[in-house]
Image (tube, coloured by chain):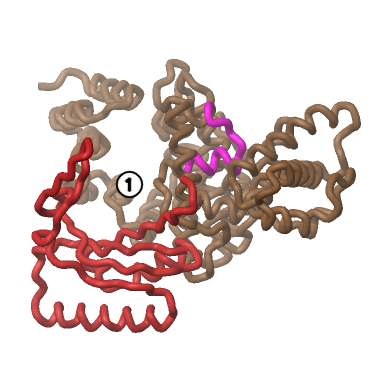
Chain colours: A brown, B red
Amino acid sequence: MAAAFRAEWGRVVATLIRVTGDWDLAEECAQEAFARALETWPVDGVPRGPGAWLTTTARNHALNRLRRGATETAKLRELTAMSGPPETPDPPDVSGVPDDRLRLIFTCCHPALPLDARVALTLRTLLGLSTAEIARAFLVSEPAMGQRIVRAKRKIRQAGIPYRVPPAHLLPERTASVLGVVYLLFNEGYAASGGADPIRGGLCAEAIRLARVLRDLMPDEPEAAGLLALLLLQDSRRDARQDAAGDLVPLEEQDRDRWDRAAVAEGAALLDAALRRAAPGPYQVQAAIAACHATARRAEDTDWPQIAALYDRLLVLTPSPVVRLNRAVAIAMAEGPEAALPLLDDLEADLPGYHLLPATRADLLRRLNRPDEAAAFYRQALALARAEPDRRFLARRLADLGPVD
Amino acid sequence: MQYMMLICGKETDVLPPDEQAALIADTEEWVKEMDGRGVRRIGNRLRLTEAATTVRVREGETLLSDGPFAETKEQILGFDLIECADLEEALEVASRHPSARHGSIEVRPLWPFDEED
């Protein structure tokens, strides 16, 4: 029942916001409807259309609240018009009810809101996480997270951010903003997975759930499918990327039997279907790179020339120094470390203080059998890295070099 | 809804004459278009911040200071009051103002006196 609740929460809230125009009222009435379901379903059985039952119950609750308030006549008129006779025990067919979740997510992810607020608001209103859960996931206090959500809702109301799917000419840019929020959510969980707090790692599952909703709501957007594929392919390695001590295991050393084959298969199939639409975007290309890794039976079977070619395409779509660094790594694997060293020189100015740049250089020098230089760059990387697992990994690599000058 | 577009930029910036002329022409074009659409209520440029006086009243005493309230890198150079359906339209109107390309434009909703928070 909990899973069903979570799946329906966003739908109920999204519709109630459209109907009442009041985000707080929408959430309160949704909560009320779910509480009532908890009381009555175990006794009366689960209704035929649980989602419609919840939406109708929440809507009737809103209607009563507004009636008691009696001031907001316009809202009341709109509610009555859409709900038919109030308190109908068995709600009418749901198929005619539009899915309002797309409006909700585009509004939550509007670029006029700060990025952290977009993520928090999406988790709260669409996925139904509690403020306490979101606060823990993002390592801030509950009052601070509550404030962030309150401020975001206030800005939506005061600044007049419309509750609708953006018009066609804004859609590509706004879709990118929505997908970006989902990807940020996933990375937040991925960076923390295996850590002390399962809720942080659970963000990956929430991001995948959200990506599934988006793929269903935007069937014609191949980047939505590409994002879901990317998340599934990355998440398939979850159990293999840390050892028993909690240390990071690099890709080439991972036990590939521990990869989630079902997730790989689903991700690969989604990606194939998306690519057939011939509108590749950054998420599809990244998913294609992830698929190259996920489908290699052994590390030495990895198709590095293909990965390097995919990074070439990614660089055209999203020219960023981090993509250039990853491309250099792929070229090192495809053509040898010498080919990649000059590419790293070009990155010095663009990635100051980024520990993966000296770490990559150290790795290339290690493979070129130049341990003294490698050690110097591992030390430089160690001085920059802050996350404990990263530091332990670098220290281990440094120790593996043996005695150096 | 009504929104105030605050046109911000560096008042010390001097554009080459041809760019300056183009900026003025583009701005006139924008004003004509937005007046035609019925979006723009009023607007003007402002005198330099050296002509500004900031008023504060503290403990019943009126304090005047020469210049703008805050010393910042950018100043408010002008404004337009626009009436739009929602923020989406306001942002579209603001993004088409030529000054958005040189400086920046802060879009702030008006806060009518009969509305709480």
In terms of depth relative to the viewer, which is nearer, A374 or A385? A385
Which quarter of the figure has residue B98? bottom left
Identify the residue at image location x=20%, y=80%.
B24
Residue A18 painted magenta: no
Q: Which residues are magenta?
A: A118-132
- Residue B110 placement (x, y as % from top left): 40, 58
Residue A59 showing in the rendered view: yes
Q: Is residue A125 magenta?
A: yes
For the point 18% across and 58% down, the residue is B75
Q: Is residue A172 left or right of residue A269?
A: left
- Give the amino acid at mark 1: Asn
Out of A66 and A105, give the one closest to the viewer. A66
Kindly tell me whether residue A335 is visible in this rendering: no
B87 versus A148 height, above or below: below
Q: Splitting the image into 4 quarters, where does residue A69 fall?
A: top right
Above or below, A248 relative to A215: above
**Magenta segment main secondary structure:** helix
Which quadrant would residue B39 be assigned to in this image? bottom left
The residue shown at (45%, 51%) is A286
On screen, B53 above or below A139? below
Q: Chain of mark 1?
A: A
Q: Which residue: 43% across, 25% down?
A: A141
Residue B59 falls left or right of residue A44: left
Residue that carries the numbered disc 1 in the rendered image: A326
Q: Position of residue A219 (x, y in %)?
A: 63, 60
Q: Nearer the viewer, residue A7 or A268?
A: A7
Where disc 1 sits, the SS reads helix
Q: Quadrant of the N terminus of chain A?
A: top right
A342 and A79: which one is in front?
Answer: A79
